[in-house]
């Protein structure tokens, strides 16, 4: 499952952010796309922390976070989010195999 958090979302709407993340609490594999974000609010960091704790207590795989912004990456590192999450500049997902024609 992939959740994308665009830059410029209304950080005063924590309920909307939580609803966007709700499906991630049970997903077996999770990719969080922050590639378009140039800043990160404390509200998003709080949501990521809550998500991480929930997934960890249920033995679910750590989420992968995709970040393009050097500022956002540094903020995640300084906040310690590079340890509980796997943070990458990009992720290449394998393409599904095509059936072989008979």
Image (cartoon, rainbow, N blue to C red):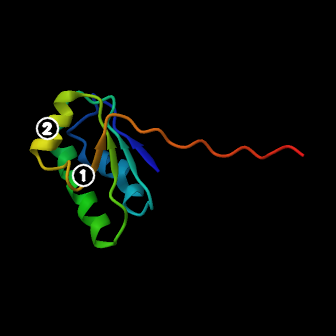
**Residue 101, percent across and down?**
85, 43
Please, is residue 37 above or below residue 101 in the view?
above
Query: Which quarter of the picture shows residue 91?
Result: top left
Q: Is mark 2 on a helix, strand or loop?
A: helix
- Residue 75 — which label? 2
Which residue appears at 18% of the width and 47% of the height?
A: 45
**Residue 3, percent across and down?**
40, 44
**Residue 74, percent across and down?**
14, 35
Q: Which of 99 and 46 is in front in this view?
A: 99
Q: What element carries label 1?
A: helix
For the residues marked 1 and 2, what is the alpha-carbon distance in whole angstroms?
Answer: 13 Å
Which residue appears at 63% of the width and 45% of the height?
A: 96
- Residue 48 — which label? 1
Q: Do the residues labelled 1 and 2 touch (CB within 8 Å)?
A: no
Mark whose residue sits in front, 1 or 2: 2
What is the crowding at mark 1: few (fewer than 14 residues within 10 Å), some, or many (at least 20)?
Answer: some
In the rendered structure, the answer to whether residue 59 lies left or right of residue 50 reads right
In the rendered structure, the answer to whether residue 90 lies left or right of residue 94 reads left
Please, is residue 36 above or below residue 95 in the view?
above
N-term-proximal mark, 1 vs 2: 1
């Amino acid at each position: 499952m992939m959740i994308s958090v665009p830059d410029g979302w209304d950080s005063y709407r924590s309920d909307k952010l939580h609803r966007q993340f709700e499906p991630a609490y049970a997903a077996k594999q999770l990719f969080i796309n922050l590639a378009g974000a140039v800043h990160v609010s404390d509200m998003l960091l709080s949501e990521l922390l809550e998500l991480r704790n929930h997934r960890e207590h249920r033995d679910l795989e750590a989420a992968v976070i995709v970040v393009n912004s050097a500022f956002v990456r540094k903020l995640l590192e300084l906040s310690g989010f590079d340890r509980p999450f796997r943070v990458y500049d990009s992720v290449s997902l394998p393409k599904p195999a095509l059936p072989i024609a008979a």
